[in-house]
Image (cartoon, coloured by chain):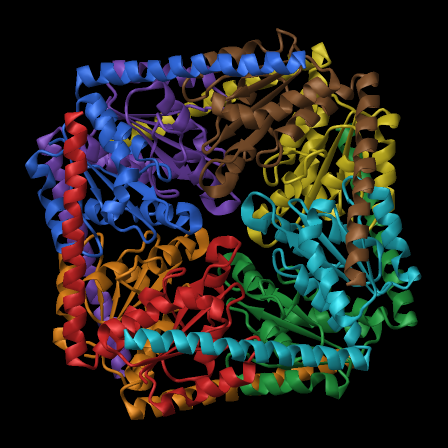
Chain colours: A yellow, B cyan, C green, D red, E orange, F purple, G blue, H brown
Amino acid sequence: MTVGILMGSDSDWPTMKAAAEVCVEFGVPFEADVLSAHRMAVEMIDYGKAAHERGLKVLIAGAGGAAHLPGMLASVTPLPVIGVPVPLKYLDGMDSLLSIVQMPAGVPVATVSIGNARNAGLLAVRILAAFDEQLLTKMTAFQENLAEVARAKGSTVRDGAAELRKS
Amino acid sequence: MTVGILMGSDSDWPTMKAAAEVCVEFGVPFEADVLSAHRMAVEMIDYGKAAHERGLKVLIAGAGGAAHLPGMLASVTPLPVIGVPVPLKYLDGMDSLLSIVQMPAGVPVATVSIGNARNAGLLAVRILAAFDEQLLTKMTAFQENLAEVARAKGSTVRDGAAELRKS
Amino acid sequence: MTVGILMGSDSDWPTMKAAAEVCVEFGVPFEADVLSAHRMAVEMIDYGKAAHERGLKVLIAGAGGAAHLPGMLASVTPLPVIGVPVPLKYLDGMDSLLSIVQMPAGVPVATVSIGNARNAGLLAVRILAAFDEQLLTKMTAFQENLAEVARAKGSTVRDGAAELRKS
Amino acid sequence: MTVGILMGSDSDWPTMKAAAEVCVEFGVPFEADVLSAHRMAVEMIDYGKAAHERGLKVLIAGAGGAAHLPGMLASVTPLPVIGVPVPLKYLDGMDSLLSIVQMPAGVPVATVSIGNARNAGLLAVRILAAFDEQLLTKMTAFQENLAEVARAKGSTVRDGAAELRKS
Amino acid sequence: MTVGILMGSDSDWPTMKAAAEVCVEFGVPFEADVLSAHRMAVEMIDYGKAAHERGLKVLIAGAGGAAHLPGMLASVTPLPVIGVPVPLKYLDGMDSLLSIVQMPAGVPVATVSIGNARNAGLLAVRILAAFDEQLLTKMTAFQENLAEVARAKGSTVRDGAAELRKS
Amino acid sequence: MTVGILMGSDSDWPTMKAAAEVCVEFGVPFEADVLSAHRMAVEMIDYGKAAHERGLKVLIAGAGGAAHLPGMLASVTPLPVIGVPVPLKYLDGMDSLLSIVQMPAGVPVATVSIGNARNAGLLAVRILAAFDEQLLTKMTAFQENLAEVARAKGSTVRDGAAELRKS
Amino acid sequence: MTVGILMGSDSDWPTMKAAAEVCVEFGVPFEADVLSAHRMAVEMIDYGKAAHERGLKVLIAGAGGAAHLPGMLASVTPLPVIGVPVPLKYLDGMDSLLSIVQMPAGVPVATVSIGNARNAGLLAVRILAAFDEQLLTKMTAFQENLAEVARAKGSTVRDGAAELRKS
Amino acid sequence: MTVGILMGSDSDWPTMKAAAEVCVEFGVPFEADVLSAHRMAVEMIDYGKAAHERGLKVLIAGAGGAAHLPGMLASVTPLPVIGVPVPLKYLDGMDSLLSIVQMPAGVPVATVSIGNARNAGLLAVRILAAFDEQLLTKMTAFQENLAEVARAKGSTVRDGAAELRKS
């Protein structure tokens, strides 16, 4: 496995699944599991410590509220850890964001936008792509495709504008 | 030892010392040490797991930014853990507060006000006092004294007001 | 009674009930009542002053907005007071949180996460457990069970991941 | 006395004094004292309950952090209570503001801007002036004077602008 | 008329009506109207300037977003102005609150909690009651009734607790 | 074309359309298109660089989250750029607002309220009207009409008040 | 005069002067004065109403806290109004920003970054430049110069980096 | 060069230099330069587009306020981009953080804590280390050293505690 996708509970899967889908999209081997900083502290540390020896290159961790999983994993692995702030019922994910991004000097977490596990997946792919010519080409193509899709959406707006002008 | 006071770095000592001073004030045995969630994860977990067996009754943990120490300790000890949000250079401790207080259901942290280690110490004493008649009497006396001091401060204000009236 | 659960209105009961349920779960005697800081100030103070004499060991108080109940109770009892920030219609409980947690030096309130009365109950149990071997064993078992449940949830995620890989 | 100015500690006097100065300015009899919600709960309630019988017409209360004094006073007096959010070391008074202004339906506090005890004094005078022709005339004159002063300040700006144009 | 209730649009009426209902409840004569700071600036100023001459004693103004009505009215009347921060679609009324409460020294607005026009009405009644023995008695009765109602709500909670204990 | 209305995706059109409707209302020629800072960076820069040469006088750009379109356009055009903070699923548009308004010295963006594309359109018209007597007259009439409409809404409120009085 | 620069007090001049300096820099005639929404409401409205008749094309208004000047001016002039959120002692200008930018539909204020009067001046110049070929050329040159200066700053960083490498 | 460190101005160098120092510490070749999104848009895009062809593996970009550099670079390079929110004079870097982290799906930025360029450097090293056994060993040693240093700091706290006990 190349990418490990971790989360505190299966209730995070609907959010975190988007990271896994990116891996599938780019043909990157991944594993996904529940690993709770607050309920499985020892297993979490064991997982983190062993990750690079098992061949993993990047870890993605999603958590909400007092979100400790990404930072705790980063503290025990030398690998890059990507944190996804999962928004809970209150505060719109602002607590999750600050709990993940505001790590002290020495232990970085690569934080992406609130609830945006897709970007966590894409960041993992970029990291791998920096050392994999083929993946780099795929990422470039993916970005070109983003542009195509954006351009295509222009017609909806231009048509809407044309209609307004007639009215 | 009855109370354990933990912090991520010796730079937190000037803030956290106030908790220790309360212990001295109330004659409660305590220990204080550096225990970093992000730099000494395994030791932190070992400390937490063994705390109640060593006779500790309450843990106090101070941390700033993405403040994981109180919550991580709470996840491995059955004892009550009091969290002190230590304010860092930016955000006035709001990140520390949310990282400590917003714990998921199952693992509570008793959070006190930003930078207020004195209150963490007093909360620890209240917890002990609930099961210690003598300490309870001391706490009641302490509170009565707070009132005395507050009352005494009234004269400054009354005098200031009198002066203003004359002007 | 060992634990007193107070709230400003019966509209807080659906939130605060979770604290009572924890007491039932752990076999801890509790009482629950409406006690409004803003509508029953004198009764509130009387309740707080008499609490420890009636054998109560911990008070749990829930309140929203300009949430004064936990802090006012803490000012008249020597017992530990746990505050639950109840979120109102606006501001997602941020006002409730700050009104409860930001107590001045001298009068601590043990604040838990927004809307999380379950954690208030668990914190009360931890406080009692520190002085009750049997309860401590129960709390340790409870925590081990949390881990079991979390581990069990892993299969949902692993299955979801497996399915994605096939697609 | 007509106006009562209360605060939790003499350390609030430098801030709250501005309210007293307004009273002097407008010739309104006032008293000022320390009255701590968290340290003198019973006295606070006694003061609030008796205030209108002693002839007081308006109460002004300043408090910081988990600021309970204005709201608690409002809960025991039928008089209008003006709250001044006193900013503490962290959070710029946002906690004080929310703790004072976000009162539940039934118990209003007339909140003024952060740290602005002068406005609390002026609001008290307006309240009195609504029922005192002479005071109303004074307030109108005061407002006209504000305009005069503002107008006078225009020359500084116009001169500054003229200088810039020449440069 | 004694109390004037103003708002920027009829869409604020469902919120602001609660202030009018309090006036009815306490038998206080009131008027209510649309008066937009941003759309009827001149009329607004004329209304404010004439208010006290027309016998009005208190103005209540509700506004949302960049909420200028309460502050602008306060700048042209010597009467006390009560501001109600009306929450809009975004930001939960935080913008409305700050736009109303953060008035510069010289021009106070008596701000109540977000969306709480009922409290604005009650504050107006308190202001009037300070100079009207009968109204003062009514307000005291109203407050005693608040306590009665709160006490009555206790049985719901006590019954709920009893039921939990049996389960 | 006189006004260019740009947005990062066709999903912004329902929000941004209000700017176009204002243009239609005032008879101002406009164009609207998708132009994504993050997906079409080069085209965006080309569009911005050429805008004034194509006769455009004002650009309106809407964006959400890390909203870079308005600021990036402003960096490559000498024309005034109006930014509309589009609120996304979390944070109520606060991230969009700060990403747009907090531009460094040298490159201003004229920011309007969150989600308020109508105001962006009206601001564009004001800019044009400053140099177009006829448009200025239209804008003055529009403002007078706002007042008319606001005045008309008064009857709803006055009727509602009358009804309350009778009840 | 082409640009009017207004502020509530001469204490805002040190901040607002930067807008005037831009006018000087670009040879744009301007006037600057104190005009207080809260202390000179009638004059403010008179100024706003007459502005376009006096030949002014753009108004710049700076204000802090409950900042009403920009929005009130915008409500009485058909000209574009640029708002500068002036930061006060508390809240870092967040109150000023929200009070200025969150205007209701119908009355836009072109808001620039907190304390950034220089950008207000540059935005005014852009507005004028859209209708003045010569000014447009100047603005383009100004922007090219910004790039030159930025490029020149690169050597400091490159030299710093080189030095680090040697160490 | 392996790592590119970019910033909008040489005034960011004192903050961003910490990232360069990490590169020196770990023997990672790096370049550092000024590259302003708002003043050198075209060069920025050219730099981003060419980065991977020049052999760069990771980009680090620091920016403040409406911080567009990290996100804009990420939009034109397939490489991982690390964003450092540089705090400006107001808002404590909250605007910088949100402008960098809240990127839309498709274009991730790996955001680190406010003002923490050291962590950006360490994250870059982790990314490289995932594909470089030797660097991985260095990172593991670095982390072990962090623990050593933290442990060593414990004596300061333990001594401080001992002293308090004696007093």
Residue B117 as seen in the image, left or right of residue H134: left
The residue closer to the viewer here, C33 or B58, is: B58
Q: Quadrant of residue E6?
A: bottom left
What residue is shown at x 70% (from left), y 37% (from top)?
A17
What residue is shown at x 77% (from left), y 20% (from top)?
H129
The residue furthest top is H54
The residue closer to the viewer here, F122 or H57, is: H57
Residue G66 as seen in the image, left or right of residue B47: left
What residue is shown at x 14% (from left), y 66% (from top)?
E49
The residue closer to the viewer here, H38 or C22, is: H38
Q: Quadrant of residue C47?
A: bottom right
Whether residue F92 is visible to the viewer of this picture, yes or no, is yes
Residue D71 as seen in the image, left or right of residue C110: left
Q: Position of residue D71 (x, y in %)?
A: 47, 74
The residue closer to the viewer here, H14 or C132, is: H14
Residue G73 as seen in the image, left or right of residue F102: left
Looking at the picture, does residue B129 appear above or below residue A126? below
What residue is shown at x 44% (from left), y 13% (from top)?
G151
Whether residue H8 is visible to the viewer of this picture, yes or no, is no
Q: Quadrant of residue B75?
A: bottom right
Q: Position of residue A21 (x, y in %)?
A: 69, 30
Q: Position of residue G164 (x, y in %)?
A: 64, 16
Q: Which quadrant is home to the N terminus of chain D?
A: bottom left
Q: Position of residue B89 (x, y in %)?
A: 57, 43
The residue furthest front is H167
Looking at the picture, does residue F34 appear above or below residue B135? above
Q: Which quadrant is home to the C terminus of chain D?
A: top left
